[in-house]
Image (cartoon, rainbow, N blue to C red):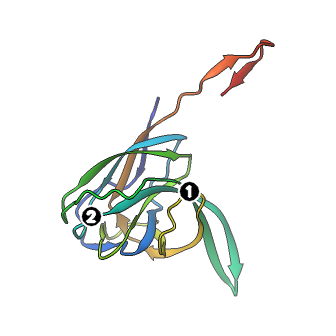
Amino acid sequence: MAVIDVGNPAVAGTAGTGNGYTIFTLANPATANGKIYTVEFMPYSDVGGIRFGTFFFVRTYVEDSTTYYVYQCRDSTANLTDFCPAGVMKTYAVTLVIKTDDYIGCYLSGARWIAFNYPFTPGIRGIAGEHINPGDEFTAGNISEWKLSLHGIGATIPIISKESAAGILQII
């Protein structure tokens, strides 16, 4: 199994974002299929509830000369409610399905903020509201070109095969 590393290092930030938004970082997308088992994030304000998820690009469309980007949530956690004070990195044990080119993101409700730093591109995309259930599809706007302090670590899933009754190798 190979390590999957997605997102940015969870470091103290100079500002925060995420209050009432589903957001994800375009930086460092997944390079393989597998599962994320650890998520690290740095809150900019005290956080008492957060959901993490994986997201993927679906399509673009153009309307009135403006290009829009559509994404979908692949997998997500339940609301994680342990308290995390501002400026203290928090590590969560999770199980999130991730595929090549997926992004890591989160949803924070209320007056809660995740840290970010400047400058960095490709930045952060998101949408107002909770769009973090598997299958949720949404048009995401650019939140900023800053670096979101959110990092996922996981591993590729080994391919398991078996021989069928007819002697044909099957990938399962």
Task: Tell me the element at label 1.
Answer: loop
Instruction: Tell me the residue that label 2 is attached to.
Output: 48
Residue 132 in picture, x, y percent from top left = 50, 62
The amino acid sitting under disc 1 is Pro
Residue furthest to the bottom:
64
Instruction: Tell me the residue that label 1 is attached to.
Output: 134
Task: Tell me the element at label 2.
Answer: loop
The amino acid sitting under disc 2 is Gly
User: Observer-nearest residue: 38 or 3?
Assistant: 38
Horizontal side, residue 74 vs residue 8: left or right: right
Which mark, by number, is residue 55?
A: none
Residue 67 in picture, x, y percent from top left = 64, 77
How many numbered discs sit on the rendered protein?
A: 2
**Quadrant for the C terminus in the image:** top right
The answer to which image quadrant residue 161 occupies is: top right
Count residues near mark 2 (Cα–Cα under 10 Å), then give few for <14, some for 14-19, many for 20+: some
Horizontal side, residue 9 vs residue 5: left or right: left
Horizontal side, residue 49 vs residue 140: left or right: left
